[in-house]
Amino acid sequence: MKVLVTGGSGFVGRHIAWRLAAEGCEVVFTGRNATAATEVIQHSPGPLRWVPVEHGSPAAAATLREASQGCAAIVHCAALSSPWGSVQAFADANVASTEEVLQACEANGVKRLVHISTPSLYFAFRDRLGVRESDPLPPPVNEYARSKGLAEERVRAAGLPEAVLLRPRAVFGPWDATLMPRLLRVMQRGPIPLMRGGRAQLDLTCVDNLVEAIWLGLNQPLPRALCTYNVSNGTPLAFEDLLHKVAAAFQLELRTRRLPWPLVDLIARGLEASARLRGSGEPLITRYGAGVLAFSQTLDLQALHDELGYRPVITQDEGIRQHAQWWLAQRGARP
């Protein structure tokens, strides 16, 4: 089976490219960074071919059409996953890239698309437990969620013969550049605020478990043309418990401070306003970044279990341990 992986030089994309190569698939992957692409190829258990693409550029659609010739499936991982960024950056990375992928599917008769979306679509600054894929969506919490919602709409409107939308929660593992690095930076800088008592229930996803869900999405028979599935480890835990596990695994001192959510929310609003006025980068704390640690959000995985036969291939604790081992090895001692 020949598969195109967009964003294959990124975190999730490289892991699925490696899994596909290990399974004997012919793999083409896209990405912008030649250094990262070389790293992906060097660590691969099988041959890979890199095609450079700048999504949103005039040449992107034609490049993807050429790269996807002869492909049975496309895994669309390319995205800007961040709580902070410009409207145009999210539109190019998340919406335009999806439109380009859909054009490639139509042009080359690609049979199946696995599109990586996000459960950020569910977030609403309130506790939500056991969220199902069919639950009504609140207004987008930020530009990232808005752009990913628009991307899902594009996939639904395309009418592909077989399409899978995956919404993985808080993905972490080796080469993660988003979730764990942000948490570690905050841990290193001083006491972490424990909002609402640190009791918020969080779902996480080891990257190996997401890769397993993607593999199933590529290979299992689908009950309908368009399927949407939540993905996680299926073992929610309280935020404070997560901090203790991460601190122990990453060999960090844990300092916490219990703060009321309204105060943290006010601070985050101020930091965001300052960043916008200055035109500077992402503030240390964003409303969304703080909110996901203050409010519970867990996912119902019944559809993924029943329809694709998903079972986690690695436990949450083992995933944290493996990530920490990789992180420490990259830095020689401590992160």
Image (tube, grey):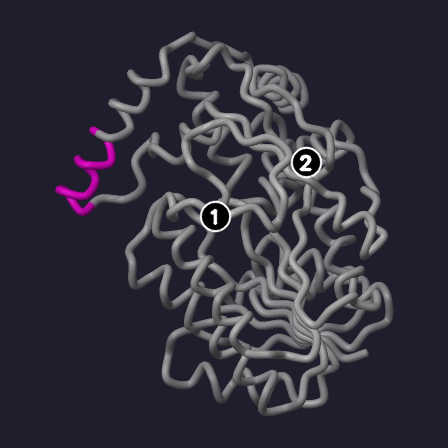
Q: Tell me what residue is drawn at x 17 percent, y 35 percent.
A: 274
In the picture, the disc for residue 323 is 2
Q: Is residue 99 left or right of residue 141?
A: right
Specify the quadrant of the image occupied by residue 12.
Answer: bottom right
Q: Tell me what residue is drawn at x 43 percent, y 16 percent.
A: 195
Q: What is the crowding at mark 1: few (fewer than 14 residues within 10 Å), some, or many (at least 20)?
A: some
Quarter of the image that includes the N terminus: bottom right
Q: Is residue 316 left or right of residue 139?
A: right
**Residue 100's spot in the image, x, y percent?**
49, 79
Predominant secondary structure, magenta span? helix
Q: Amino acid at mark 1?
A: Leu
Specify the quadrant of the image occupied by residue 242.
Answer: top right
**Toward the viewer: 153 or 289?**
153
Q: Nearer the viewer, mark 1 or mark 2?
A: 1
Above/below status of 62 relative to 156:
below
**Is residue 276 rendered magenta in the image?**
yes
Callout 2: SS:
helix
Q: CA distance from mark 1 to mark 2?
A: 32 Å
**Is residue 156 rendered magenta in the image?**
no
Quarter of the image that includes the C terminus: top right
Residue numbers of the magenta segment: 270-279
Residue at the disc numbered 1: 137
Callout 1: SS:
loop
